[in-house]
């Protein structure tokens, strides 16, 4: 019985298109000669996606398997989905050397307090970690850090390694650092702008983050010194803005959107928190803060609503116990929604990174001077 060849497999797999990058997986380099094995009629294919959080991973795996199995001489197909997370970082630009081993840095902000920004940031980080990505969580809310409570890190202090770098605390597979773990719970931070900037710089430069696919930074509310210092210290790959449905909340969110635009930080979209409430007694849905206004506001600013999270009575008690809602209720609606939001963010960053790579490639092409005759 004739054995299928690697060129035949590669040619057949050109029919599989990445829906976000709009190219086939062979052209994109997701599959190569080196990622294919053949043992008689048994074929193994390892597909390297641009992010472990790819929202169409299962669909692509199914398509690849179906195509390989349909080839003459193939009796079985073992399709393994892997990832090499893409990045737009590097190239010697100012600030990029500060987090050289971090592929993507995402800020999670809000225009005002009380909208659940830290809760969203922590659950988003965990959702990305659940895909197999290496994820760090930096609590930059220096005045009111809440990540230690959300992760159950009270009483746990970071240590120093042999290089005198701060070792982030690991919890739920996340690497986390927060001002809340460098101060006593009763201490108040009474600092002016330069001191805030210096503390943030230490979190970035003096923490042994190691290799990360994503670093999620939970910003304090507003548009003050911490936000501006952060954009000056490192280039952010994207920002997510958290809001609640009320118009009064979005009035402040507009300022956060404007700040990111002024500092040239790509806006990945909005997350509407406390969007609705499903009554556990009768199953009815109530829009306590109104319905539909966030979508209109987002459209006005040409932004995507990444997800709408319900007001869930279990979030508060879980947080008080140091559990994220996706851990307390892994099969619940919140866990599903955070997974969807993480997938959208990862896909958007992959597209932006690919576009940046193409732009840099063209820039290099057009910068080549013609050879004199």
Image: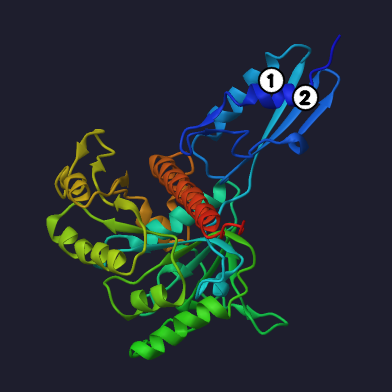
Way the structure is coloured: rainbow
The residue nearer to you, when weighing 328 against 276, is 276
- Compared to residue 267, the image places residue 309 above or below, namely above
> Which residue is at a point 64% across and 81% down the rendered structure image?
165
Q: Is residue 324 above or below residue 223?
A: above
Q: Which mark is residue 89?
A: none
Give whichever of 345, 8 is nearer the camera. 8
Res 145 → quadrant = bottom left
Instruction: Point out residue 64 in the picture as x, y percentages from the top left corner.
Output: 63, 25
> SS for tag 2?
strand
> Which residue is at a point 44% across and 44% down the rendered structure image?
335
- Residue 184 in view of the camera: no
x and y, in percent, of residue 194 in the image? 38, 90
Q: Residue at x 82, y 26 (%)?
A: 38
Residue matched to label 2: 43
Q: Quadrant of residue 280?
A: top left
Residue 173 x %, y %: 60, 57
- Marks 2,1: beta carbons within 8 A: yes
Specify few, some or many for label 2: CA neighbours under 10 Å numbering under 14, 14-19, or 20 or more.
many
Q: Quadrant of the N terminus?
A: top right
Secondary structure under tag 1 reads: helix
Q: Which residue is mark 1?
A: 68
């Amino acid at each position: 019985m004739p054995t299928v060849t690697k060129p035949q497999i590669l040619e057949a797999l050109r029919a599989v298109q990445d829906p976000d990058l709009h190219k086939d997986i062979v052209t994109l380099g997701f599959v190569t000669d080196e990622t294919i094995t053949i043992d008689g009629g048994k074929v193994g294919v390892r597909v390297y996606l641009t992010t472990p959080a790819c929202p169409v991973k299962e669909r692509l795996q199914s398509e690849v398997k179906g195509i390989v199995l349909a080839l003459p001489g193939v009796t079985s197909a073992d399709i393994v989905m892997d990832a090499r997370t893409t990045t737009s970082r590097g190239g010697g630009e100012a600030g990029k050397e500060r987090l050289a081993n971090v592929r993507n840095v995402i800020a999670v902000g809000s225009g005002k307090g009380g909208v659940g920004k830290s809760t969203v940031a922590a659950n988003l980080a965990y959702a990305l970690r659940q895909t197999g990505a290496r994820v760090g969580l930096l609590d930059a809310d220096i005045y009111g850090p809440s990540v230690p409570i959300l992760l159950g890190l009270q009483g746990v202090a970071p240590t120093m390694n042999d290089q005198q770098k701060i070792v982030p605390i690991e919890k739920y597979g996340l690497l986390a650092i927060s001002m809340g773990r460098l101060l006593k719970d009763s201490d108040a931070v009474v600092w002016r702008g330069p001191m805030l900037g210096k503390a943030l710089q230490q979190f970035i430069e003096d923490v042994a983050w190691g290799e990360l696919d994503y670093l999620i930074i939970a910003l304090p509310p507003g548009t003050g010194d911490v936000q501006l210092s952060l954009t000056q210290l490192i280039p952010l790959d994207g920002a997510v803005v958290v809001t609640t449905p009320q118009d009064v909340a979005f009035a402040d969110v507009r300022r956060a959107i404007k700040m990111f635009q002024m500092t040239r930080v790509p806006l990945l979209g909005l997350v509407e928190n406390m969007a609705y409430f499903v009554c556990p007694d009768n199953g009815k849905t109530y829009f306590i803060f109104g319905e539909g206004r966030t979508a209109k506001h987002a459209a006005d600013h040409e932004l995507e609503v990444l997800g709408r999270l319900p007001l869930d009575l279990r979030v508060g008690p879980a947080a008080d116990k140091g559990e994220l809602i996706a851990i307390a209720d892994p099969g619940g609606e919140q866990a599903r929604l955070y997974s969807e939001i993480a997938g959208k963010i990862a896909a958007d960053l992959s597209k932006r990174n690919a576009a940046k790579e193409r732009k840099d490639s063209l820039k290099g092409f057009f910068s080549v001077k013609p050879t004199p005759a």
